[in-house]
């Protein structure tokens, strides 16, 4: 899946990710007092307690489920085009566990502990044709720092 953001794309929410060297990076924060990570990066007065960090782009699938029915309002997608999708938690080694969309054509291939890589996923399209993107995770080779 293509990870590059173009002029015809925008993130669903500002401050969630950025593109660095052609690859997406989640924008997190590391608390100055104890080094604990937060995602998304805190804003407002709380932001002063954190230093900005790019989170790891690879990790291990920690848990997941499959959303097989259209969510209730205020679902932002089009109920007419809803397709089941997987959502999971990916552990970014030494940092944090992040929830995100899991990109797969075969839910049976998802396995706890599987290596995952950050990617961008089309969510919907603005009236002007701009593609709205969310972050997600797809299958990857063994991530750096993995111990199992």
Image: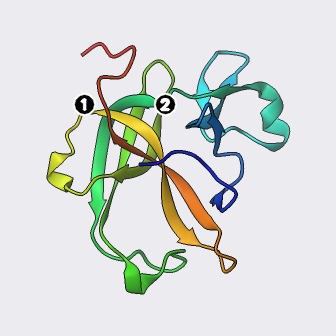
Q: Which residue is mark 1?
A: 113
Is 137 placed left or right of 134 in the picture?
Answer: left
Is 41 placed left or right of 67 in the picture?
Answer: right
Is 104 placed left or right of 2 in the picture?
Answer: left
Picture quarter with the C terminus: top left
Q: Are marks 2 and 1 in contact (CB under 8 Å)?
A: no
The image's colour scheme reads: rainbow
| The quadrant where residue 37 appears | top right
| Vertical position of residue 137 compared to residue 76: above or below | above
Q: Look at the numbered disc 1 and give the secondary structure of its residue.
A: loop
Q: Nearer the viewer, residue 23 or 107?
A: 23
Q: Nearer the viewer, residue 8 or 105?
A: 8
Name the N-terminal-most of marks 2 and 1: 2
Q: Residue at x 73, y 18 (%)?
A: 32
Q: Look at the numbered disc 2 and give the secondary structure of its residue.
A: loop
| Vertical position of residue 20 compared to residue 33: above or below | below
Q: Residue at x 35, y 35 (%)?
A: 116
| Vertical position of residue 121 compared to residue 37: above or below | below
Q: Which residue is mark 2?
A: 57
Q: Position of residue 113 (x, y in %)?
A: 25, 31
Q: Nearer the viewer, mark 2 or mark 1?
A: 2
Local crowd size for mark 2, using a 10 Å CA cut-off: few (<14), some (14–19), many (≥20): some
Q: Nearer the viewer, residue 104 or 38?
A: 104
């Amino acid at each position: 899946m293509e990870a590059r953001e173009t002029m015809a794309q925008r993130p669903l929410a500002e401050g969630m990710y950025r593109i660095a060297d052609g690859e997406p990076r989640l924008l997190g924060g590391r608390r100055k007092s104890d080094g604990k990570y937060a995602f998304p990066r805190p804003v407002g007065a709380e932001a002063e307690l954190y230093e900005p960090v790019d989170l790891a782009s690879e990790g291990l699938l920690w848990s997941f489920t499959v959303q097989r029915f259209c969510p209730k309002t205020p679902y932002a997608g089009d109920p007419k085009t809803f397709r089941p999708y997987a959502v999971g938690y990916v552990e970014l080694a030494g940092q944090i566990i992040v929830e995100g969309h899991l990109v797969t054509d075969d839910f049976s291939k998802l396995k706890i502990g599987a290596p995952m890589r950050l990617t961008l996923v089309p969510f919907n399209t603005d009236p002007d044709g701009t593609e709205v993107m969310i972050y997600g995770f797809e299958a990857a080779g063994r991530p750096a720092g993995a111990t199992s």
